[in-house]
Amino acid sequence: MTTTFPVLGKLGRFACLLTTACLLLTAPGCSRKQEAVQEVQKFDYPAPRYPKYLVNIEGRDLLPSARLAVRQSTGRAPLGKMQSGQEVYVLINRGQDMKVWEAIKQAWAERGVTAKTFGYWDVMGLTKEEYEARTNSGWVRGNEAWKEIGNFDEIYKPFFPESIQKEFGNPVGEIAVWSYLIPYLDKHPEIKYFYGGTGGGSLWQQNLGKHGDKFMGNFMYTGAVELLSKGAEFPTDLWNLVDEKIIRPIPFVSEVKLTDPEGTHLEWTVTPEQATKWFEEAGSSNHLYVYPNPLYSSMKEGGLIRAHANHTGIYPTMTVRLSKHGAVEKIEGGGRVGELFSMLVNLPKFQTAEFPKAPSPGYWFLRQDGFATNPKFVRNIPSYVAGEPWYANITERNRAGIQHMAFSYPSTDAEDLAYAKKNGYPVDYHHTSHMHMYFPTVQWKLRDTGEWVTIAEKGDVKAFGDAEIRALASKYGDPELIFRYEWIPEIPGINAPGEYEEYASNPWKWIMEQWESIENGKYQHYLEDYPTQRVQTQ
């Protein structure tokens, strides 16, 4: 594990982080001298970039990328699990680019795998036309991030007034489709292997009961951007080693710090027993838990999360303040996202919850959520503009170094589950109101040596610099290219000129202006393509 010492030799960089947070929180003691330090160093973050090869991709040959995708046996979409002679099904939703599907189908066929599709409409007993008519009102675009609160996990929708429920529309989300899938699979024994959904792979398997072993993984190649972004090019064994290296020290961790230049600042202490529990539930590939469950750790003096994106889209920057137990105390900003989340948090039913194992009353706590480890994925801005059947911003959370967080009562304890069932509370896998962090710094203190190890610094996954990992990467080509981030967001006041607070008031406007320059060939931060590094026969 690559180690760094968070003070010696890096004082200026950490001063930048602390001073940025200080300015954003307007905490006592922030001096003009500190403001000057922040002004000088506020661009000390990875420079923005967007891959030029993903501009104007209409008509691109998709088959070379599809051939790589069907060889990848780890990550969110491990299509490489399928072997010659097998038949596999893919559950598709409306909005699936069928040219992408045909490329993947052909690539599988070249490996002796027969691939077929079945749709959400089939599972629900509808024609495709009936399904599309039903779900038209649920179509979401990147400037409708507020729809996530009711649609990511539809179990929360009934807690809103009927008028707001109607505004959410009527999509059929990935969580909602599970109840339809079980009887459908009962009637279709020919489906022995299938892929579906864009996330939550372990939850798909868990919630399909007796059919769980038929679920092979997610299928996130819904459009050309996902397939051509080089995400499928990241070698399987290398990816596995990266994930393994990151989680290996967890049993020995006693403290955790997580910061981000938009203002997030969280700290935990962890006992040996808590660290063991954390390690046992360390997440899945490209969705690692790099901080402990707040119910099984102790937060230092509460905490703060500040972000402007969720799985559906972009919203004005929102601040969520947490108690020392990780419970949501206050929500500030966020536009309609903040308004709707506040409605849920302030409902008496949620405020008066008294779970047996809870450290304090209430329901809304920070929960563990995913940290990504594949450097090749790219924000799918065309999905923002055209819209998606459920959420339009799912792809960016898959890029290495991006941390997403969410909220609920994060317990699977038997007593808590029994209490929830008796009193009508959503628990276990249920959660909502995601927040994405683009430049997190994550540090762990080791109990036995007192040493601090850096898991990510300003969004950079430090394991990519590990000697063993780079030696393995060299088997496939130049490690510098293999670990190259293909997309880095441009955020004024953090890694680009401008004032962050001005950006924070309307990030959607800034992103759309950037996208216009990207499409028109005028962007100043294009990233050029490079030849495929991964061995085709892997």
Image (spheres, rainbow, N blue to C red):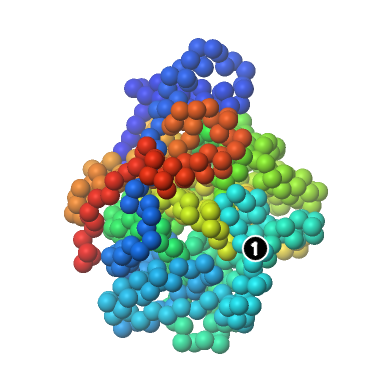
Whether residue 74 is visible, yes or no, is no
Tell me the residue at 35%/64% (across/down).
59
| SS assignment at label 1 | helix
Residue 18 against residue 143 in the figure, above or below:
above
Camera-side residue of 133 and 501: 133
Q: Residue furthest front?
A: 520
Camera-side residue of 525 and 8: 525
Residue 203's x, y, as percent? 53, 64
Looking at the image, how many numbered discs can be counted on the residues?
Answer: 1
Tell me the residue at 43%/32% (across/down).
495
Q: Quadrant of the N terminus?
A: top left
Give the residue type at disc 1: Gly
Residue 394 placement, left or right of 320: left
Residue 217's x, y, as percent? 44, 67
Q: Could you classify mark 1 by the number of other residues whose Cα lies within 10 Å: few (under 14), some (14-19), or many (20 or more)?
A: many
Camera-side residue of 234 and 406: 234
* Quarter of the figure with residue 522: top left
- List the residue tagged with mark 1: 138
Residue 524's x, y, as percent? 37, 37
Residue 461 against residue 88 in the figure, above or below:
above
Q: Quadrant of the C terminus?
A: bottom left
* Quarter of the figure with residue 484: top left
Whether residue 117 is visible, yes or no, is yes
Tell me the residue at 21%/67% (across/down).
537
Tell me the residue at 25%/47% (across/down).
481
Residue 152 against residue 328 in the figure, above or below:
below
Residue 126's x, y, as percent? 62, 81
